[in-house]
Image (cartoon, rainbow, N blue to C red):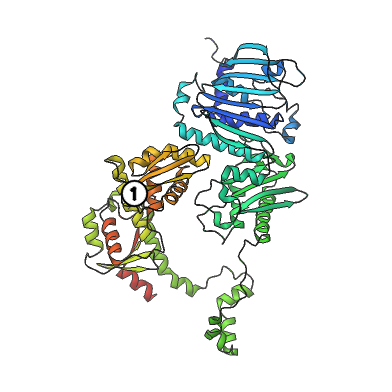
C-alpha cells in the first residue's frame, strides 16, 4: 500500500493560511496599512477600485526594502521583527508574524515597487499564486508601493462569498478609520474609483477624530489622560448627549493597536452609569499604553483580540480614568443646592420627628439595610409571601413571552385569526385611555390589556413595509424643497448600499457628489420637513442590526424603518389615534409581539388581579 500522507504544495498551504488572515478586501487593507506604519512612513495613500475586489494599493514614503527583502517578504513567516521566542513578548510593531504578504500573494496578483534611500534603483516584483513571475530593477521614489489585484482570482468559491461593493467598502472604511485614528501624526488618504474620500492631514488626535467621525463631535469631546507606573490611558470620550443607539464610534487601542474588548467596553459603560440610557452607547477613542510583557497580542490571526496579564487592573484603571474625566469637566450629574421652595411645604419637613417616629423608622428593614451588617440583600419572610402572587403572575406572563423566539416567529397555537383575536381580547365599543403617554389601557372581556404604543406601532409598520417590499412600492411624495445633506464616509457607504431598497419603501435618495445626497421624496404618509433627521435615525437603527447575520439587508432595513417611525413613549395620542392603532395591531398576522419578539401587550385577567390584592 502506498503512503497516504504528503506535504501540501506551498501555494496550497498559503491559500489555506490566507483564509485565516485575508477574509475580504478590508483584511488586506489592514495588513498593508500597518506594514506602511511599521516602515516609518509619514505619508500613506490607500487606493481602492471595485471595493477592493479588483485593486487594493498602498503607497508609502517609508524606509523601503532591498531587492532581497522585497522577494523574501512574500515567504511564509518571513519577518524582520522576531529573532527569538522572547521577542514575541516585547512586540511594539503592528505586524510581526510574517503571514500577511504571503497570504495576499496566495490569493491575489501582486505588484511591488520598493526603494531604500541608500539605493540608486528600486525593485519591481510581480507575484501570482505565490510564484514570482517577474523581478527587475526600476526607477522609483523612496518607499514602497504594493498593489493587490483581483482578490481570490484563483479561489472562485471565496470570491463568491464577498458581499456587495457598498458592503465591502464599508468594511474597508472601518479598517482605514482604525489605523488613521491610531496614528494622527501620519498623513492618510483614501481614494475609491478615482474619487478621494479622505484627505487627513497630520495633526492632533482630536482633529483626526473630528475628521473621521464627524464635525458634530468638535465641541463634545472630553479629554481622558491618566498616567500610572503600570499603564497610561489617554484619548477622548463623548459627552453624554452624544450617546447613540449603536456602538459604532467606540475604539480601544492597546499600544496603538486597535482591539475589540467587551470587557473593557463594560468598564466604560459603568463609568457612564446613570448618565445615559441603558440602551445607548457613548463615543470613546481610548489609548492604553503598557509594557508589551503585560499583554499577549498573538492570540488571534487578525490581532484584534488580546490578553492582558492582569485584566482586572486594566478594567479598574479604564473605569476610573473615564469617571475622573467626566467629573473633571463637569459632565457628571451634580447636586443642586438651590432648594425648590415647594419642598419646604411637605409634611415630612413641617411635622416634628417624634421619638415614636424615630423608633418606627429604626425598626424598618430599610433602616437596617443601611446601618447593620449583612442586611443589604435580606428580604423578610412576610415580604416573600406578599411577593409570591406577583412572582406567579409575572412567570405566567414570561412563559407567554418566552414562547416567541428572537426572530419574531410565534408558536402556531398563539396565532389566532386577526378578527378572532380582536373579538376575544377587546370589545370594539369600549373606551380606550392612555397611561403615562406610553401605554394604552383597554378593557377586555375578562380584565384589561396594557398595550405598549411603540411596540404595537412597530408591529403594524413592520407588516406594512414587509408587504410593500414584496409587492408594489410605497407611494412617494416628491419634496417641494429637496434636502441636501452630507454624511461621514462610513455612513455614506451604508446609504449608497440601501438607496435602491429605500426607493421601494417610498424614499427617493440620490447621490450628489462626495458623500453628499439629496432627498427627493418621502413616503406619502410621512410628514415633510424632518427628512434629514429621518435618514440619520434610520442609519443608526440599521447599524444597530448590522451585526445580526441571520437577517438579509432588506429585512434589516424594514426593521430599522419600523423602529424609527414608530410612535415613541411620551407621545400623547387622541382617542381616535389610539383606536386606529389598536385596530391596526389586531389586524396584523402576529399582533402579540414586535418583529424582535418583545410583547406588544400584556393581558391582566380578573382572577390574577384578585390574587394580587388578596395576598
Q: What residue sits 64% from the left and 23% below the top?
A: 145
In the image, 328 versus 91, the foreground residue is: 328
Residue 152 coordinates in the image, percent (x, y): 50, 22
Query: x, y (%) of residue 256?
Result: 68, 40
Horizontal side, residue 539 vs residue 138: left or right = left
- Residue at the location (68% across, 29% down)? 96
Q: Position of residue 376 (x, y in %)?
A: 59, 69
Q: With respect to residue 611, does 9 lie above or below?
A: above
Q: Quadrant of residue 610?
A: bottom left
Q: Secondary structure at mark 1?
A: helix
The image quadrant that residue 592 belongs to is: bottom left
In the image: residue 236, left or right of residue 419? right
Which residue extends farthest top?
Answer: 1
Is residue 7 something that shows in the picture? no
Residue 487: percent from left, percent from top: 50, 43
Residue farthest along the front direction in this orientation? 481
Q: Residues within 10 Å of mark 1 (few under 14, many from 20)?
A: many
Q: Quick one: 378 or 460, which is closer to the camera?
A: 460
Which residue is label 1 attached to? 462
Viewer-nearest residue: 510 or 468: 510
Q: Is residue 523 visible?
A: yes
Amino acid at each position: 500500500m502506498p503512503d497516504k500522507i504528503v506535504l501540501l504544495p506551498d501555494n496550497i498551504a498559503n491559500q489555506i493560511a490566507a483564509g485565516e488572515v485575508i477574509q475580504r478586501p478590508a483584511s488586506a487593507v489592514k495588513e498593508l496599512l500597518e506594514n506602511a506604519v511599521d516602515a516609518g512612513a509619514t505619508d500613506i495613500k490607500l487606493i481602492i477600485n471595485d471595493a477592493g475586489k479588483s485593486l487594493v494599493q498602498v503607497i508609502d514614503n517609508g524606509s523601503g526594502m532591498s531587492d532581497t527583502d522585497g522577494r523574501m517578504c512574500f515567504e511564509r513567516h518571513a519577518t524582520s521583527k522576531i529573532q527569538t521566542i522572547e521577542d514575541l513578548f516585547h512586540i511594539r510593531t503592528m505586524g510581526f508574524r510574517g503571514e500577511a504578504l504571503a497570504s495576499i500573494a496566495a490569493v491575489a496578483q501582486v505588484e511591488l515597487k520598493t526603494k531604500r534611500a541608500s539605493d540608486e534603483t528600486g525593485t519591481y516584483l510581480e507575484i501570482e499564486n505565490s510564484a514570482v513571475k517577474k523581478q527587475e530593477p526600476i526607477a522609483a521614489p523612496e518607499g514602497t508601493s504594493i498593489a493587490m489585484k483581483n482578490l481570490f482570482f484563483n479561489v472562485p468559491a471565496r470570491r463568491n462569498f464577498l458581499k456587495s461593493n457598498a458592503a465591502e467598502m464599508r468594511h474597508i472604511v472601518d479598517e482605514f478609520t482604525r489605523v488613521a485614528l491610531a496614528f494622527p501624526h501620519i498623513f492618510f488618504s483614501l481614494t475609491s474609483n478615482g474619487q478621494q474620500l479622505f484627505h487627513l492631514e497630520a495633526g492632533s488626535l482630536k482633529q483626526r477624530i473630528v475628521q473621521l467621525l464627524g464635525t458634530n463631535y468638535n465641541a463634545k469631546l472630553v479629554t481622558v489622560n491618566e498616567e500610572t507606573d503600570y499603564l497610561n490611558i489617554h484619548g477622548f470620550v463623548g459627552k453624554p448627549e452624544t450617546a447613540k443607539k449603536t456602538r459604532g464610534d467606540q475604539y480601544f487601542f492597546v499600544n496603538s493597536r486597535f482591539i475589540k474588548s467587551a470587557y473593557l467596553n463594560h468598564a466604560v459603560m459603568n463609568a457612564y452609569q446613570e448618565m445615559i440610557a441603558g440602551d445607548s452607547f457613548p463615543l470613546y477613542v481610548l489609548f492604553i499604553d503598557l509594557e508589551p510583557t503585560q499583554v499577549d497580542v498573538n492570540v488571534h490571526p487578525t490581532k484584534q483580540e488580546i490578553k492582558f496579564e492582569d485584566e482586572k487592573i486594566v478594567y479598574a484603571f479604564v473605569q476610573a480614568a473615564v469617571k475622573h474625566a467626566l467629573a473633571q469637566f463637569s459632565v457628571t450629574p451634580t447636586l443642586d443646592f438651590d432648594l425648590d421652595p415647594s419642598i419646604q411645604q411637605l409634611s415630612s419637613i413641617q411635622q416634628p420627628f417624634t421619638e415614636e417616629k424615630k423608633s418606627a423608622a429604626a425598626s424598618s428593614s430599610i433602616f437596617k439595610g443601611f446601618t447593620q451588617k449583612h442586611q443589604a440583600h435580606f428580604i423578610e419572610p412576610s415580604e416573600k409571601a406578599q411577593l409570591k402572587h406577583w412572582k406567579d403572575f409575572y412567570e405566567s406572563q414570561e412563559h407567554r413571552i418566552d414562547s416567541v423566539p428572537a426572530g419574531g416567529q410565534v408558536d402556531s397555537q398563539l396565532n389566532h385569526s386577526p378578527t378572532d383575536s380582536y373579538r376575544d381580547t377587546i370589545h370594539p365599543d369600549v373606551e380606550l385611555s392612555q397611561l403615562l403617554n406610553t401605554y394604552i389601557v383597554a378593557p377586555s372581556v375578562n380584565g384589561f390589556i396594557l398595550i405598549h404604543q411603540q411596540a404595537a406601532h412597530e408591529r403594524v409598520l413592520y407588516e406594512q413595509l414587509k408587504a410593500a417590499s414584496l409587492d408594489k412600492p410605497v407611494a412617494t411624495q416628491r419634496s417641494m424643497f429637496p434636502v441636501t445633506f452630507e454624511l461621514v464616509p462610513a455612513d455614506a457607504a451604508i446609504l449608497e448600499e440601501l438607496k435602491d431598497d429605500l426607493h421601494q419603501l417610498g424614499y427617493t435618495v440620490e447621490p450628489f457628489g462626495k458623500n453628499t445626497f439629496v432627498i427627493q421624496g418621502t413616503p406619502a404618509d410621512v410628514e415633510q420637513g424632518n427628512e434629514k433627521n429621518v435618514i440619520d435615525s434610520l442609519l443608526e437603527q440599521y447599524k444597530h442590526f448590522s451585526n445580526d447575520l441571520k437577517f438579509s439587508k432588506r429585512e434589516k432595513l424594514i426593521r430599522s424603518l419600523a423602529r424609527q417611525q414608530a410612535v415613541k413613549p411620551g407621545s400623547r395620542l387622541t382617542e381616535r389615534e389610539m383606536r386606529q392603532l389598536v385596530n391596526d395591531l389586531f389586524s396584523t398576522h402576529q399582533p402579540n409581539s414586535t418583529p424582535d419578539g418583545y410583547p406588544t401587550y400584556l393581558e391582566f385577567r380578573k382572577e390574577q388581579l384578585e390574587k394580587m390584592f388578596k395576598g
